[in-house]
Image (cartoon, rainbow, N blue to C red):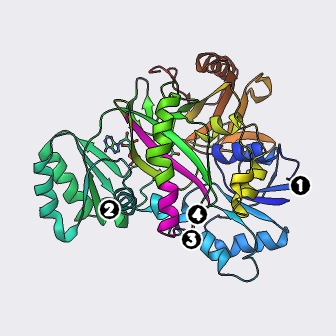
């Protein structure tokens, strides 16, 4: 099978690495990819959001399957684009339809889905510019902290949590009236604050059957001790030590099964990865958010723990017989530490030469933001490399990753030295 993978981050390098372990994969193309994917597959220079260009690449390279990494092309409707085009509608695209991707693309849509299907989640109300005063009155009825969420995609910045009522009212006004996040904040979801510890649950679905992939915990803040600005993710561990079998049974019964049933009932056309952001409140799971794709850097610890052939699982999605496929998980823990450019998630420089990649032993370096220049690997993003290691437990994996990180260097390198500190 000839496969095209869309995206260019650490998630895509990890997916490419995993797909290449399958005998079913005879050629792998990544668009646009990075220096890491270039070392194992063929990079194609095209924008995944330019659907006619994707179609051309699919035809020119005789592609039999498309796997979508990031959310943007999904939310913009790449799956529907394929299904509506006679030339390419027979080529499976692993990912949800435009409507299904609304679970990530619209917080209000996701909350409505959660309530409709009785899935545990925080209480909420949604407001628009015309109802900003009702929104302020609603804030007055809540106890702090106040959780305000821009409805649409806002590059991970659309959630604001405030302790002060007046600040929360001002923020609501900024979002709705002054369009702080542009169109993304033309609607704002205000939520009850839930207090607990977060984890990510990943589910593969063909629309009716499902497989629960390994859990992971992501470290989102830039600073040690979970302080400072939010990032795309600074490290991850899998499995999550506090997600016991008993807890995961609750997750399956209360969250996963009703989610898959809901996708079917509402005809959302969801084939692909459901990323369920959970919070454990006491001993109970609540849904914080859905995403329509894998997480990054969670993929860099989840893929290494899947022993089964991922292409076989993807075929199960395409053919709607995922129930006939095996999912075998590695007992070992996997951990990843993200190396980022100094200044990230605010302003940072690119184009720094990365040294020491050849000295890494017994860890896997997934490239996140890199490119090739004159035969050298250079930095090309805020998040640069994800250093993944196996261990008999997460402590051992983390130790191995830090030992290898000591061999890597680029100008203004930064990483958190406390991944796993809270476990
Ligand atoms: P989201 O983009 O919806 O995942 O929100 C981003 C982050 O905000 C989450 O990872 C949580 O840390 C936090 N958060 C979101 N909703 C809530 C909530 N209802 N209660 C507490 N924290 C929340
Ligand atoms: N690591 C969180 C995400 O991918 O959204």
Mark 4 or 2, nearer chain start: 4
Q: Residue at x 30, y 34 (%)?
A: 195
User: Spatial distance from mark 3 to mark 4, Cα to Cα?
Assistant: 9 Å
* Disc 1 secondary structure class: loop
User: Spatial distance from mark 4 to mark 2, Cα to Cα?
Assistant: 23 Å
In this picture, is 189 found above or below 238?
Answer: below
> Residue 51: horizontal and vertical position, in percent?
65, 72
Q: Which residue is mark 3?
A: 77
Mark 1 or 2, nearer chain start: 1
Q: Which residue is mark 1?
A: 26
> Residue 17: horizontal and vertical position, in percent?
76, 42
Residue 156 at least partly seen: no
> Residue 76: horizontal and vertical position, in percent?
54, 69
* Disc 2 secondary structure class: helix
Please give the label number shown on residue 96. 4
Residue 35 at least partly seen: yes
Q: For marks 3 and 2, give the one nearer the viewer.
A: 3
Mark 3 or 1, nearer chain start: 1
Mark 4 or 1, nearer chain start: 1
Mark 3 or 4, nearer chain start: 3
Query: Does the magenta-highlighted stretch encompass residue 367?
Result: no
User: Spatial distance from mark 3 to mark 1, Cα to Cα?
Assistant: 27 Å
> Residue 226: horizontal and vertical position, in percent?
40, 28
Disc 4 crowd, CA 10 A, few/some/many (<14, 14-19, 20+): many
User: Spatial distance from mark 3 to mark 2, Cα to Cα?
Assistant: 21 Å
Bounds of the magenta segment = 259-280
Q: Which residue is mark 2?
A: 185
Q: How many marks?
A: 4
Q: Contact, CB < 8 Å: mark 4 with mark 2?
A: no
* Disc 4 secondary structure class: loop
């Amino acid at each position: 099978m000839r496969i095209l993978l869309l995206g260019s981050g650490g998630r895509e390098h990890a997916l490419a690495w995993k797909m290449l372990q399958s005998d079913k994969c005879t050629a792998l193309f990544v668009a646009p990819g990075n220096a890491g994917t270039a070392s194992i597959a063929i990079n194609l220079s095209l924008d995944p959001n330019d659907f006619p260009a994707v179609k051309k690449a699919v035809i020119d390279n005789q592609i039999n399957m498309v796997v979508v990494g990031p959310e943007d092309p999904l939310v913009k409707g790449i799956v529907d684009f394929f299904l509506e085009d006679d030339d390419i509608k027979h080529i499976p695209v692993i990912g949800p339809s435009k409507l299904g991707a609304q679970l990530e693309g619209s917080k209000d849509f996701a909350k409505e889905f959660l309530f409709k299907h009785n899935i545990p989640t925080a209480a909420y109300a949604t407001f628009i510019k015309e109802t900003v005063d009702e929104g302020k009155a609603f804030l007055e009825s809540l106890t702090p902290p106040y959780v305000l969420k821009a409805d649409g995609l806002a590059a991970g910045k659309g959630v604001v949590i405030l302790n002060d009522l007046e600040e929360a009212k001002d923020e609501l006004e900024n979002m709705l009236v002054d369009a702080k996040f542009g169109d993304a904040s033309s609607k704002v979801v205000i939520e009850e604050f839930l207090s607990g510890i977060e984890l990510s649950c990943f589910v593969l679905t063909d629309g009716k059957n499902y497989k629960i992939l390994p859990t992971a915990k992501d470290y989102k803040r830039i600073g040690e001790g979970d302080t400072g600005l939010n990032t795309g993710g600074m490290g991850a561990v899998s499995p999550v030590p506090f997600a016991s079998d008993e807890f995961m049974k609750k997750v399956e019964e209360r969250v996963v099964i009703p989610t898959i049933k809901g996708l079917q009932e509402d005809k959302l056309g969801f084939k692909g990865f459901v990323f369920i952001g959970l919070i454990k409140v006491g001993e109970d799971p609540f849904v914080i958010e859905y995403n329509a794709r894998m997480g990054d850097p969670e993929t860099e610890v989840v893929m290494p723990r899947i022993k089964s052939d991922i292409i076989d699982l993807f075929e199960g999605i395409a053919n709607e017989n995922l129930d006939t496929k095996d999912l075998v998980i590695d007992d070992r823990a996997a951990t990843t530490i993200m190396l980022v450019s100094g200044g990230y998630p605010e302003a940072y420089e690119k184009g720094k030469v990365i040294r020491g990649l050849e000295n890494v032993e017994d860890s896997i370096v997934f490239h996140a933001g890199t490119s090739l220049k004159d035969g050298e690997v250079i930095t090309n993003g805020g998040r640069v490399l994800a250093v993944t290691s196996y261990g008999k437990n997460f402590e051992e994996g983390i130790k191995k990753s830090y030992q290898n990180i000591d061999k890597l260097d680029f100008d203004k390198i930064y990483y958190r030295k406390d991944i796993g500190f809270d476990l």
